[in-house]
Image (cartoon, rainbow, N blue to C red):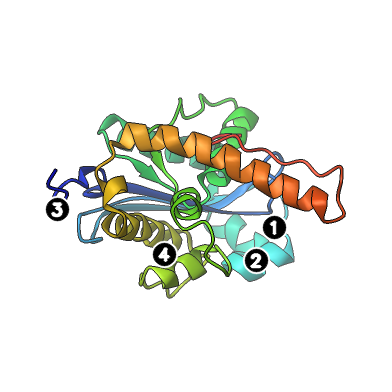
Amino acid sequence: MDLSNAASWADTLAVFDLETTGIDIDTCRIVTAHVGVIGVDGQVLEQREWIVDPGVEIPTAATLIHGVSTERARLEGLPAVQGVVEIIEALTDAANRGLPIVAYNAAYDLSVLDREAQRYGHEPLRSPAPVIDPLVIDKAVDRYRRGKRTLTATAAHYGVPLDDAHNAGADAIAAGRVAQAIARAYPHLAATAAAELHSRQVDWCREQAESYQEWRRRNGEPEFTTSGRWPVR
């Protein structure tokens, strides 16, 4: 098989990222979002960005990460009920065009979006697929690499610039470019259909969660549990 042109799933990608008020998928709220499209060389073809007024105070710790304060969100942001539906519509449009949706640690971003849809009575993003999660894939193909697996660290490993981490646009675009770099580095993944790769990630994420849970339990937390559901928990 000639693999040189096999990475068709990586040629054009939708990219998605959220910045939020916290880390709990059931309670945190969207503050900023990016949905875009990148081309085969990682060039930005389309982009939409949102600042959202989450309707709650943005904790100082979150502001220090993404730079958006409660005051700025109230002044510049869309009401959450409007912003959430626009984000869902943008992702639905990308999916309807047959574009894989790339999100780094997708189970976080897509789960937050799902909970926000429920919160405001919107129709959730229906069965998002195919989703490409560079975090899950990288852990599967390079399991024993030492060091952090943050987007910043993983981008550096694959030679992808990320100059403005925790900016939703910068993170979304970098995640897409990391996905493309992984496709170049691992030809067998490049040759895998996006739908099949999505299915593999379901299994990989479950296995990774089980392994992490076992490690935590062996190291002094016998009651620790974590979910391996993917891409929506």
Horizontal side, residue 165 vs residue 183: left or right: right
x 66%, y 46%: residue: 211
- Near-viewer residue (179 or 169): 179
- Determine whether the residue tagged by mark 3 lies in a helix, strand or loop: loop
Residue at mark 3 to residue at mark 1: CA–CA distance: 47 Å
Identify the image quadrant of the N terminus.
top left
- Near-viewer residue (75 or 62): 62
Identify the image quadrant of the C terminus.
top right
Residue 194 image-quadrant placement: top left
Mark 3 vs mark 1: give the one in front: 3
Q: Are marks 4 and 3 in contact (CB under 8 Å)?
A: no
Residue 58 shows which numbered tag? Answer: 1
- Near-viewer residue (37 or 183): 183
**Mark 1: amino acid:** Ile
Q: Are marks 2 and 4 in contact (CB under 8 Å)?
A: no
x 34%, y 32%: residue: 195
Mark 3 vs mark 2: give the one in front: 3
Q: Position of residue 68 (x, y in %)?
A: 59, 64
**Mark 4: amino acid:** Ala
Which residue is denoted by mark 2 in the rendering?
63
Query: Is 33 drawn above or below residue 152 in the view shown?
Result: above
Residue at mark 2 to residue at mark 1: CA–CA distance: 7 Å
Residue at mark 3 to residue at mark 2: CA–CA distance: 44 Å
Horizontal side, residue 42 vs residue 165: left or right: left
Which residue is denoted by mark 4 in the rendering?
170
Which residue is denoted by mark 3 in the rendering?
4
